[in-house]
């Protein structure tokens, strides 16, 4: 066969394959759009399990209609357009769609009496004494050798790198004995800069490949971009999704705490990521669980988790403690309150700095959870203090770690003994 013909055939068969592939991909895309639009498929979040709706049975007739509407509106989902496809509020019950796209509903009946008084109880006043409580301290992220992968790592001018996971662990270690002195038991969810999960990113390679196929199609199997996409995904499934799920398992099955405190430090986006300069901004905020977005409510497991948290009324303890901690960060650590601008967070109560967001950790840990985000690590005020700590200047009044832990301790004390 003449070379030109071979080239033409090979080009034309390559082109045909490409066109057939493109058409098939487009048809698959259209089908997936139609399926997603009409919600014909059951949906669970990454590595999630099909939820057990019958677990809610014990909460039948424990919440009034007005309470349900109030909690949904002020904590869990403020926009009817986000929940109306999934939740129907009748006179005697609320109906929650069990499986995305199916006409299959869980009926949660309201209590007959209006327990409206429960809504007006000031959150801080119903707190038990810390004596005998089990408080789990969850140092955010992993730190150590994992900090770069989990993108909680930065370094400037050859200084020792800042790793959020190491700082959060140090705060938890400082805080634990001081909480025990109040008569509570403090348990660290992670004691080292190592993952809680036994899985590693390579264990998620197949799931990541499958995901990449869905989002990017089946072409360019060997492309560098595709490989990076798969690598990012398998890492994320490891350090963010499976790690938090493993912590949830440990908390829910073994530690069984009365309360979880998730310890984090915030960081601001760099104005110029190439030429990093410390920022002016330094602030705090404290998160409770809530503000489920429309796209999140499309997941079957997230709907049952919302209802589970609401009927347990965990948001009431969360708000009370979050407000006390936010006041402590303002007064004792001298931090102004951060305000969200977008729809992914909802302002809770009157105390500045307290917001609701739906995060995997504060959704999966089955008890009240407060999620702390004080200090901006890459700020002019905080960065030198982190460097001092990294260089071994620890324990004095100027120590950032000690100040953070002291603010949390004071917030806890004020909450339990208002
Ligand atoms: Zn964090």
Image (cartoon, rainbow, N blue to C red):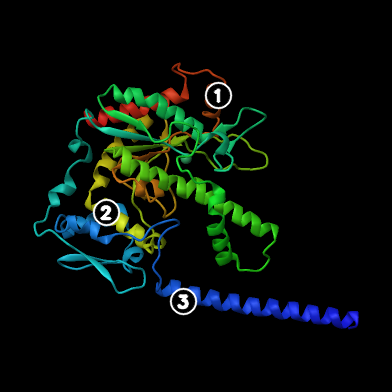
Determine the CA span between mark 1 and mark 3. Answer: 53 Å
Residue beneath label 3, please? Answer: 34
Going from N to C along the chain, the mark reached first, 3 or 2, is: 3
Q: Are marks 3 and 2 in contact (CB under 8 Å)?
A: no
Which percent across, then down, holds residue 10? 79, 78
Q: Quadrant of the C terminus?
A: top left
User: Is 397 situated left or right of 316 in this image?
Assistant: right
State whether residue 206 is above or below residue 256: below
State whether residue 48 is above or below residue 180: below
Element under disc 2: helix
Query: Given the current orientation, which residue lies at the most extreme top position?
Result: 396
Residue drawn at (86%, 83%), measured in percent from left and top? 5
User: Pointer 3: residues within 10 angstroms few (<14), some, or many (20+)?
Assistant: few
Going from N to C along the chain, the mark reached first, 2 or 1, is: 2
The answer to whether the residue bearing label 1 lies less than 8 angstroms from the nearest atom of ligand 1 is no
Q: Are marks 1 and 3 in contact (CB under 8 Å)?
A: no
Quarter of the image where one finds residue 147: top right
Which percent across, then down, holds residue 136? 34, 35
Residue drawn at (17%, 58%), measured in percent from left and top? 66
The answer to whether the residue bearing label 3 lies less than 8 angstroms from the nearest atom of ligand 1 is no
Q: Which mark is residue 352?
A: none
Query: Given the current orientation, which residue lies at the most extreme left position?
Result: 113
Residue drawn at (47%, 19%), measured in percent from left and top? 398
Q: Which mark is residue 390?
A: 1
Q: Are marks 2 and 1 in contact (CB under 8 Å)?
A: no
Q: Nearer the viewer, mark 2 or mark 1?
A: 2
Residue beneath label 2, please? Answer: 308
Q: Quadrant of the N terminus?
A: bottom right
Element under disc 1: helix
């Amino acid at each position: 066969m003449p070379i030109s013909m071979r080239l033409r055939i090979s080009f034309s068969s390559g082109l045909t394959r490409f066109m057939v592939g493109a058409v098939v991909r487009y048809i698959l895309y259209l089908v997936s759009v139609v399926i997603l639009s009409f919600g014909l498929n059951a949906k669970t979040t990454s590595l999630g399990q099909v939820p057990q709706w019958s677990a809610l049975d014990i909460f039948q007739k424990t919440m009034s209609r007005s309470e349900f509407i109030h909690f949904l509106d002020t904590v869990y989902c403020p926009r009817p357009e986000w929940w109306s496809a999934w939740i129907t509020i009748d006179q005697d019950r609320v109906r929650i769609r069990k499986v995305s796209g199916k006409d299959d509903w869980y009926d949660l009946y309201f209590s007959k009496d209006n327990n409206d008084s429960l809504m007006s109880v000031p959150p801080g006043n119903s707190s038990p004494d810390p004596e005998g409580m089990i408080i789990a301290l969850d140092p955010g992220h992993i730190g150590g050798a994992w900090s770069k992968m989990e993108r909680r790592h930065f370094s400037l001018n050859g200084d020792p790198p800042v790793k959020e996971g190491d700082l959060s662990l140090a705060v938890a270690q400082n805080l634990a004995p001081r909480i025990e002195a109040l008569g509570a038991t403090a348990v660290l969810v992670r004691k080292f800069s190592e993952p809680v999960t036994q899985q590693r990113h390579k264990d998620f390679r197949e799931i990541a490949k499958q995901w990449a196929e869905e989002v990017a199609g089946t072409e360019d199997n060997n492309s560098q971009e595709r490989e990076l996409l798969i690598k990012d995904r398998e890492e994320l499934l490891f350090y963010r999704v499976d790690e938090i799920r493993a912590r949830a398992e440990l908390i829910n099955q073994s530690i069984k705490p009365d309360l979880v405190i998730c310890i984090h430090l915030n960081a601001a986006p760099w104005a110029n990521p190439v030429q990093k300069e410390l920022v002016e901004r330094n602030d705090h905020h404290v998160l409770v669980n809530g503000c489920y977005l429309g796209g999140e409510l499309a997941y079957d497991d997230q709907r049952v988790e919302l209802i589970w948290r609401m009927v347990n009324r965990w948001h009431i303890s969360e708000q009370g403690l979050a407000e006390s901690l936010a006041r402590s960060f303002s007064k004792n650590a001298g931090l102004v309150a951060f305000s969200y601008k977008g729809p992914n967070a909802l302002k809770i109560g009157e105390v500045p700095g307290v917001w609701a967001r739906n995060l995997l950790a504060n959704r999966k840990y089955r008890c009240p959870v407060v999620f702390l985000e004080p200090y901006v690590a890459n700020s002019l005020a905080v960065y030198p203090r982190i460097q001092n700590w990294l260089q071994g200047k620890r324990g004095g009044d100027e120590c950032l770690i000690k100040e953070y832990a002291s603010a949390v301790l004071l917030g806890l004390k004020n909450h339990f003994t208002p």
